[in-house]
Image (cartoon, rainbow, N blue to C red):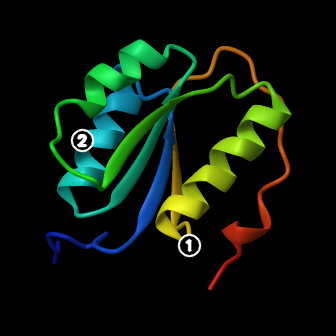
Amino acid sequence: MFEWNALKTKTILVTGARSGIGAAYVRRFFAEGASIVAADVQKEAVDKVVSEFASDRIFGVGIDVSDRDQVAAFVSGAVRRFGKLYGLGVGPVARCQTHQLHPSCGTE
């Protein structure tokens, strides 16, 4: 059986959040009660998606996911703001290197 607000108290990072499937992830995860850190290389576009919600459970950042330092800052900023991370929603990425996960992304 499906449970509404199944992600309440969880924090999810979403990349490619400016449009398409990334923006759909943002909307769905938010509807399920998650806190969201939405990211895209086009900051203005991700801000437009974030502006759909009047909540402190969501904020947007501009990052290039192929840049290791920007990804590290993205994850660290999310941890500082929301504490523990629960998941990652990855929208379309044109070109990206594999990155080592931040230590706060441990499993339970």
Residue pushed farthest bottom?
Answer: 108
Looking at the image, residue 92 sits to the left or right of residue 37; the answer is: right
At x 55%, y 66%, the residue is 85
Q: Residue 72 location in percent, x, y? A: 76, 45
Q: Quadrant of the C terminus?
A: bottom right
* Residue 107 occupies quadrant: bottom right
At x 58%, y 62%, the residue is 80
Q: Residue 95 location in percent, x, y? A: 73, 17
Amino acid carrying label 1: it is Lys
* Residue 1 occupies quadrant: bottom left
* Residue 21 occupies quadrant: top left
Q: Nearer the viewer, mark 2 or mark 1?
A: 1
**Residue 98 vs residue 60, the one in the foreground:** 60
The residue beneath circle 2 is: 27
Q: Is residue 102 above or below residue 38?
A: below
Assign a secondary structure to mark 1.
loop
Looking at the image, residue 39 sits to the left or right of residue 24; the answer is: right
Q: Are marks 2 and 1 in contact (CB under 8 Å)?
A: no
Q: Residue 48 location in percent, x, y? A: 28, 20
At x 24%, y 41%, the residue is 27
For label 2, the crowd category at 10 Å Cα-Cα, with few meaning under 14, some 14 to 19 and many 20 or more, is some
The residue beneath circle 1 is: 84
- The circle on residue 46 is none
Amino acid carrying label 2: it is Arg
Looking at the image, residue 89 sits to the left or right of residue 106; the answer is: left
Looking at the image, residue 52 sits to the left or right of residue 88; the answer is: left
**Residue 107 vs residue 42, the one in the foreground:** 42
Q: Of callouts 2 and 1, which one flags the residue occurring earlier in the amino acid sequence? A: 2
For label 1, the crowd category at 10 Å Cα-Cα, with few meaning under 14, some 14 to 19 and many 20 or more, is some
Q: Is residue 52 above or below residue 37?
A: above
At x 77%, y 59%, the residue is 102
**Mark pair 2, 1: CA separation:** 20 Å
